[in-house]
C-alpha cells in the first residue's frame, strides 16, 4: 500500500490521542488502535517504514508505531 | 383508502391508564379514559357508521353518520367526539338513528351517485360501504340539482389523482396532511356547497407544497384521492406485511397485490416504527422492483472489455468459486474479500461475513456502513458501551429540547421527521446544528430556537464549546455523572473543556457561529428536563467523525440525558439495514454483536459452530481493500448489493482499484456502476422477493416477507449458500429463519430473537435475551452497557482539506427527499418527476462573484477531479459553502470528494471538500469518459462487442 497514505492515517490516529496529557498512555492508545483495527499487512508496512526512519510520522503516531514494533512485532 | 385488512377503530387510542366501564348496546365495555364511544364500540366488534373518522386522526365530528343515543341525555351526539365514561348506556342502533343516518347519506349520494361498478375503488370505498350499511341505494333528492360531477380531476402527481367530483369534503386528507405528515399543504377552500380541497393556493398537487407522502390518499374514504396504480390495476386482493427497503426508519407496510402483481404499498397502522405513516419513497417508489433494467440471468466475462455471456446459476457459481480459489492459490489467502450490504437482510449479511471468514479463510469483510455510520459504532461503543442508538423513535414524544445535528430528517428520514414535528408543534424546543438552512429550521408552525449554522468540518469545536458552557456555567448534572460515569475520565474531561480555548468566544472564529448563540443553545439543552440528540451523516462523515460522536456522548452524559425515555443519543441511519449489517459482524475486526476477532472465547464459539479455524487478526476495510488492489495484493471481491463505484469517495481511485482486480463479482438488481467493472454478475433479489429481517435505527428487528418470487429464481441468501458450497464450505439452510436461529445462538444480544417471536410481537428491539425477553426500547437504563460511562477528550483538529485561493469554497454533500442513496432504485421510478439530476446549491453572493446565474452549468473542481452540474442559486447554503447530492452517477459527485477519512474508522470525509466553481459550457473530461465507458458497457451487456474496441 502507499506508505504515505498509511503515514497519513497513523498521524490522524495519533492526533486524536495527542489530546491525552500522559504521552505514554497516548502512545499505548495509538499502538492498541493499530493492533485492533489495522490489517497485519498494513501494520507490517507502517512498522517497516518506521524502522527505515519513519519519514512523515508525527508524535505520538511515531511513539505508537514504535511500541507496536517493539511488542513482538506488528 | 386504508389497507385491505384494516378494521378502523374510528379515533386514535387513548394513552390513559385509568379505565372506564360503560354499556354499549347491552355489551359491557371497559376502555381507557379518553376513548371515544366510537372506538369503545369498535373494541367489542360494534362498528358505528362513519365517514369523517379514521383511527389515525383526531375526531372531527362533521359527517353526522356516527350519531348515537345516550340514556338520560338529549339529542344524538357524534360517537367520534363523545368520550366514554363510567356508567354510560349507549345505543348505536334505533329507528330514529337509522332515519337520521339515511337522510345524511342520501344527501351525500345526491352529489355522488352510487355508480360503483365502474369505479376503480369498487368494493373498497367507505361511501359505498356506508351507503350499504345504512340501507341507501338511491336518493330522494335526485341527481339533477347542484353538484360537483363536472369538476376537473388533477392528475399532475405521478402517483395519485385528485378527482373533486368524488370528494365528500370530509377533511380527512387535510387533517392527515396536518396531523400525520405535518406539512399543512392542504386546506378546504370556500364555504358550504362550494367547499373544495385545495393544495397550497389552489395549485395542482405537483407544484404545491405537497411532499407526496400519500397520507391524504390513504385517509380518503372515497376514490377522490386514489393511487394511479389502483386505477391501472384494480383493487388488490391480497396483503403481505413487510418492511420498507429505503431509509433507516424501517417503516412497516402492507404490500397489496392482485394476481401476483404489486398494486400498492400501504403503511401498517400497527407498525411500531411508523404507526401507519410513510413517505414518497416507501409508499410509492416500488416500481424499480419490476423495472425492465432488472438483470435476471447470471453473467460472466473474462475482462471488462468483453461482452457479457449469460450462463446458468451453476455455471456462474462454479466459475466464481474457481476464480476465487485460483486467486488465493496464486496470491495468497488474504487476496480476496467481500462487502455486505445495508440493503440486504440481516440473514444475508450474516451469511456473507460467514462466507468470508469461514470459506475465504480471512477477515476481509466490510460493509457500506464503513462510509456512513462506522464512527457511530466506534464512538458509542467506547463511551457508553454499545454501538447503537439509545432510544425508540416514540421517545421523541417525551423530549423537551431536541438537538438535530448533521441530519436532515424531513428529507432523509421523513416519517421520523413527521413524528418529530408533531412533538415540536406540542411545544418542544429545537436546536439545529447544520451548515445548511434545512427545512426544520423554519417550516409551518415550527421554528428552531437556535440554528447554529457552522462551517463544515467544525463540529467538534462547536460541541466542545457547548460542553465548555455546560461545565463552566455549572449546568452539568453532577449527581448523575457521579453515579453513572468514570470519575477520573470526567474530571479530566471537565478540566479539558473548561479551558478558555474551548469557549464559544474563542471558537467563534473557527465555527463561524456567534458565541451568544452557542451559549444560549447550551443552556437550553442542558436545562431541559429531557434533552435528546438526533444526528446523521453530517456528524460521522468527517475526518473527526468519531471524535464528534464521542463529543455528543460526552455532552449527553454530562447533562444526564441518557437512560430514560425522552433523551438519548440517536443516530439516524441512512439505509434500511445499516444497523443490522453492523450488528451482523460485517466489520473486519469483529463478529456479530460487536465482539473483536482477537477475543479467544468469542472466536472459539464461532469456530465450534462453523467447524473451521478462524483468523484472529482484523482484515481489510473497504478503502484498505481498494488500496491493496492498487498495490497488487488484493485481487478478488464479492460485493452483495453495494455500489462503491458510485457511493464511495474519489471515484477514479475506486474504479482504478476495480480495474486492477482479476475477479470482481457483483450481486445486484441492475448493472450498477460497480457492475460495469465486474467479471461475474449474479442477479440480486429485491426486498419484495425474499424472507428475512431488517434492523432499523432504533435497533428494531422487523420481518421482511416474500411478496413475489425472486425474479432470477434465487433469493440473495440462497446465492451465498451456493457459493459457499461451491467453495467447499458447506452451508445447509432451508429458510432464513434458520440463519436467524444461528445468529441468536452465537450473539448474546440476540439470544431471544426468532422469526416466531418477531411474528408474535410485531418487531423486537435488541438486546433481546433472558434479561430482556421482549427486547429493549431504551438502553442504558440504570447503568451504561460498559458499566461506567467514559468521557473522551475531543480536541478539535482541522481537516487536512483546507480551502485555498485555488479552491476557496467548501463542498458538502447530502440527500434529498425523492431520491435515495446512489439512486439505483429511485431513478427507476416516477420519482424522477421531481428530481432528474443532481444540482449544485450555491449562495447568491458566491454565485454573483463568479457570474453564475440560476440554472447555469458550472464546473466543480477539487484536488481529486472535476464535474459539471447545474447551479441552484439559493440561500439554503451559507456563503463559502456549496452543496450537492450523489443520486445520479453521471453527475459524479464523488469524483471530486477526497481520500480523507475519519481517524478511527476510515469513514470518508464526504462533508468537506475544497472546491472552486466556475461557469462552463460542456461536461467535464471525467463525464465525457464516463459517458463513453457507460455506452460501451451497455453494448457489452447486450452480448455485443462494440465495433470500436
Image (cartoon, coloured by chain):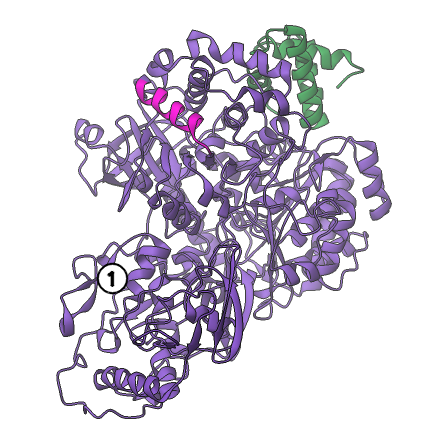
**In the image, residue B267 lies in the stretch drawn in magenta:** no
Give residue B538's position: percent from left, percent from top: 43, 33
**In the image, residue B525 lies in the stretch drawn in magenta:** yes
Is B208 positioned to the left or the right of B721 in the image?
left
Chain identifier matching the purple colour in the rendered picture: B
Name which residue lies at 48% across and 50% down: B247
| Quarter occupied by residue B859 | top left
In the depicted view, which residue is nearer to us: B477 or B586?
B477
Quarter containing the N terminus of chain B: bottom left
Look at the image and give the colour of chain A: green
Chain that bears disc 1: B
Q: Residue furthest front?
A: B72
Give residue B803's position: percent from left, percent from top: 35, 20
In the depicted view, which residue is nearer to us: B859 or B113?
B113
Residue stretch rendered in magenta on the structure: B516-529
Establish if B260 lies above or below B579. Answer: below
Q: Is residue B537 visible?
A: yes
Q: Determine which residue is flagged by label 1.
A: B205
Establish if B376 lies above or below B197. Answer: above
Element on which disc 1 rests = helix
Establish if B83 lies above or below B398. Answer: below
Establish if B719 lies above or below B558. Answer: below
> What secondary structure do most residues of the magenta stretch adopt?
helix
Name which residue lies at 61% across and 16% down: B489
Name which residue lies at 30% across and 68% down: B61
Q: Is residue B214 visible?
A: no
| Quarter occupied by residue B502 | top left
Give residue B576's position: percent from left, percent from top: 53, 50
Amino acid at each position: 500500500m502507499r506508505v504515505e497514505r498509511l503515514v497519513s492515517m497513523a498521524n490522524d490516529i495519533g492526533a486524536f490521542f495527542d489530546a491525552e496529557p500522559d504521552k505514554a498512555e497516548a502512545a499505548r492508545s495509538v499502538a492498541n488502535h493499530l493492533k485492533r483495527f489495522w490489517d497485519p499487512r498494513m501494520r507490517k508496512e507502517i512498522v517497516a517504514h518506521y524502522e527505515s526512519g519513519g519519514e512523515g510520522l508525527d508524535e505520538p503516531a511515531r511513539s505508537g508505531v514504535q511500541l507496536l514494533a517493539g511488542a513482538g512485532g506488528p | 383508502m386504508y389497507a385491505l385488512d384494516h378494521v378502523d377503530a374510528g379515533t386514535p387510542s387513548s394513552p390513559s391508564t385509568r379505565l372506564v366501564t360503560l354499556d354499549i348496546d347491552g355489551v359491557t365495555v371497559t376502555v381507557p379514559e379518553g376513548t371515544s364511544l366510537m372506538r369503545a364500540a369498535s373494541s367489542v366488534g360494534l362498528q358505528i357508521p362513519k365517514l369523517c373518522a379514521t383511527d389515525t386522526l383526531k375526531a372531527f365530528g362533521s359527517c353526522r353518520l356516527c350519531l348515537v343515543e345516550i340514556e338520560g341525555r338529549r339529542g344524538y351526539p357524534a360517537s367520534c367526539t363523545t368520550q366514554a365514561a363510567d356508567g354510560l348506556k349507549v345505543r348505536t342502533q334505533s329507528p330514529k338513528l337509522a332515519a337520521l343516518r339515511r337522510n345524511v347519506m342520501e344527501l351525500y349520494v345526491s352529489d355522488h351517485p352510487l355508480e360503483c361498478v365502474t369505479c376503480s375503488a369498487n368494493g373498497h370505498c367507505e361511501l359505498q360501504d356506508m351507503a350499504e350499511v345504512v340501507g341507501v341505494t338511491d336518493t330522494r333528492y335526485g341527481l339533477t340539482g347542484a353538484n360537483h360531477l363536472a369538476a376537473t380531476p388533477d392528475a399532475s402527481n405521478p402517483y395519485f389523482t385528485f378527482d373533486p367530483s368524488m370528494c365528500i369534503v370530509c377533511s380527512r386528507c387535510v387533517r392527515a396532511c396536518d396531523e400525520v405528515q405535518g406539512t399543512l399543504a392542504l386546506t378546504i377552500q370556500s364555504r358550504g356547497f362550494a367547499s373544495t380541497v385545495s393544495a397550497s393556493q389552489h395549485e395542482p398537487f405537483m407544484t404545491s407544497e405537497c411532499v407526496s407522502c400519500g397520507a391524504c390518499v390513504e385517509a380518503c374514504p372515497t376514490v377522490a384521492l386514489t393511487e394511479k396504480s389502483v386505477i391501472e390495476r384494480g383493487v388488490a386482493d391480497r396483503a403481505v406485511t413487510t418492511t420498507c427497503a429505503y431509509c433507516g426508519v424501517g417503516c412497516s407496510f402492507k404490500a397489496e397485490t392482485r394476481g401476483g402483481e404489486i398494486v400498492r404499498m400501504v403503511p401498517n397502522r400497527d407498525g411500531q416504527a411508523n404507526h401507519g405513516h410513510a413517505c414518497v419513497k416507501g409508499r410509492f417508489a416500488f416500481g424499480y422492483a419490476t423495472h425492465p433494467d432488472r438483470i435476471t440471468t447470471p453473467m460472466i466475462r473474462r475482462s471488462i472489455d468483453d461482452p457479457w455471456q449469460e450462463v446458468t446459476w451453476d455455471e456462474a457459481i462454479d466459475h466464481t468459486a474457481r476464480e476465487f480459489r485460483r486467486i488465493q492459490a496464486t496470491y495468497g489467502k488474504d487476496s480476496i474479500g467481500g462487502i455486505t450490504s445495508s440493503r440486504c437482510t440481516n440473514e444475508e449479511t450474516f451469511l456473507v461475513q460467514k462466507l468470508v471468514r469461514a470459506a475465504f479463510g480471512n477477515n476481509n469483510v466490510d460493509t457500506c456502513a464503513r462510509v456512513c455510520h462506522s464512527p457511530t459504532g466506534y464512538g458509542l461503543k467506547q463511551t457508553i458501551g454499545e454501538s447503537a442508538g439509545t432510544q425508540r423513535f416514540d421517545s421523541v414524544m417525551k423530549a423537551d429540547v431536541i438537538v438535530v445535528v448533521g441530519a436532515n430528517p424531513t428529507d432523509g428520514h421523513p416519517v421520523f421527521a413527521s413524528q418529530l414535528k408533531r412533538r415540536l408543534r406540542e411545544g418542544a424546543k429545537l436546536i439545529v446544528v447544520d451548515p445548511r438552512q434545512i427545512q426544520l429550521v423554519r417550516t409551518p408552525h415550527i421554528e428552531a430556537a437556535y440554528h447554529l449554522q457552522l462551517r463544515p468540518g467544525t463540529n467538534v469545536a462547536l460541541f466542545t464549546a457547548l460542553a465548555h458552557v455546560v461545565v463552566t456555567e455549572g449546568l452539568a448534572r453532577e449527581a448523575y455523572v457521579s453515579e453513572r460515569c468514570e470519575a477520573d475520565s470526567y474530571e479530566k474531561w471537565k478540566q479539558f473543556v473548561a479551558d478558555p480555548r474551548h469557549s464559544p468566544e474563542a471558537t467563534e472564529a473557527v465555527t463561524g457561529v456567534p458565541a451568544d448563540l452557542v451559549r444560549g443553545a447550551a443552556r437550553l439543552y442542558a436545562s431541559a428536563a429531557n434533552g435528546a440528540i438526533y444526528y446523521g451523516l453530517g456528524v460521522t462523515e468527517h475526518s473527526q467523525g468519531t471524535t464528534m460522536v464521542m463529543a455528543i456522548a460526552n455532552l449527553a452524559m454530562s447533562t444526564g440525558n441518557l437512560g430514560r425515555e425522552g433523551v438519548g443519543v440517536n443516530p439516524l441511519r441512512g439505509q434500511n439495514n445499516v444497523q443490522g449489517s453492523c450488528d451482523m459482524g460485517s466489520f473486519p475486526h469483529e463478529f456479530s454483536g460487536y465482539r473483536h476477532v482477537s477475543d479467544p472465547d468469542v472466536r472459539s464459539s464461532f469456530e465450534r459452530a462453523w467447524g473451521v479455524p478462524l483468523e484472529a487478526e482484523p482484515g481489510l476495510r473497504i478503502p484498505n481493500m481498494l488500496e491493496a488492489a492498487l498495490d497488487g495484493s488484493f485481487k478478488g471481491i464479492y460485493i452483495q448489493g453495494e455500489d462503491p463505484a458510485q457511493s464511495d469517495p474519489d471515484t477514479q481511485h475506486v474504479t482504478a482499484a476495480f480495474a486492477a482486480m482479476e475477479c470482481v463479482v457483483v450481486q445486484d438488481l441492475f448493472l450498477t456502476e460497480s457492475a460495469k467493472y465486474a467479471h461475474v454478475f449474479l442477479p440480486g433479489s429485491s426486498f419484495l422477493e425474499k424472507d428475512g429481517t431488517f434492523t432499523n435505527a432504533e435497533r428494531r428487528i422487523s420481518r421482511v416477507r416474500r411478496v413475489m418470487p425472486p425474479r432470477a429464481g434465487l433469493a440473495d441468501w440462497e446465492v451465498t449458500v451456493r457459493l459457499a458450497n461451491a467453495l467447499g464450505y458447506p452451508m445447509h439452510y432451508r429458510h432464513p429463519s434458520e440463519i436467524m436461529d444461528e445468529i441468536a445462538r452465537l450473539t448474546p444480544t440476540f439470544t431471544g430473537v426468532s422469526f416466531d417471536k418477531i411474528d408474535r410481537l410485531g418487531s423486537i428491539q435488541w438486546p433481546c435475551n433472558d434479561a430482556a425477553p421482549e427486547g429493549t426500547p431504551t438502553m442504558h437504563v440504570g447503568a451504561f452497557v460498559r458499566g461506567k460511562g467514559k468521557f473522551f477528550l475531543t480536541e478539535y483538529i482541522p481537516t487536512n482539506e483546507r480551502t485555498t485561493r485555488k479552491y476557496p469554497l467548501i463542498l458538502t454533500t447530502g440527500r434529498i427527499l425523492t431520491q435515495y442513496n446512489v439512486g439505483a432504485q429511485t431513478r427507476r421510478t416516477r420519482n424522477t418527476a421531481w428530481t432528474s439530476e443532481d444540482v449544485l446549491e450555491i449562495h447568491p453572493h458566491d454565485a454573483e462573484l463568479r457570474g453564475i446565474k440560476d440554472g447555469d452549468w458550472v464546473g466543480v473542481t477539487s484536488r481529486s477531479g472535476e464535474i459539471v452540474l447545474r447551479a441552484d442559486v439559493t440561500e439554503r447554503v451559507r456563503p463559502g459553502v456549496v452543496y450537492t447530492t450523489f443520486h445520479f452517477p453521471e453527475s459524479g459527485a464523488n469524483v471530486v470528494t477526497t481520500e480523507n477519512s475519519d481517524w478511527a474508522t476510515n469513514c470518508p470525509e464526504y462533508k468537506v471538500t475544497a472546491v472552486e466553481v466556475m461557469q462552463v459550457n460542456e461536461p467535464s473530461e471525467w463525464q465525457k469518459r464516463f459517458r463513453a465507458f457507460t455506452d460501451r458497457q451497455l453494448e457489452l451487456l447486450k452480448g455485443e462487442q462494440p465495433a470500436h474496441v
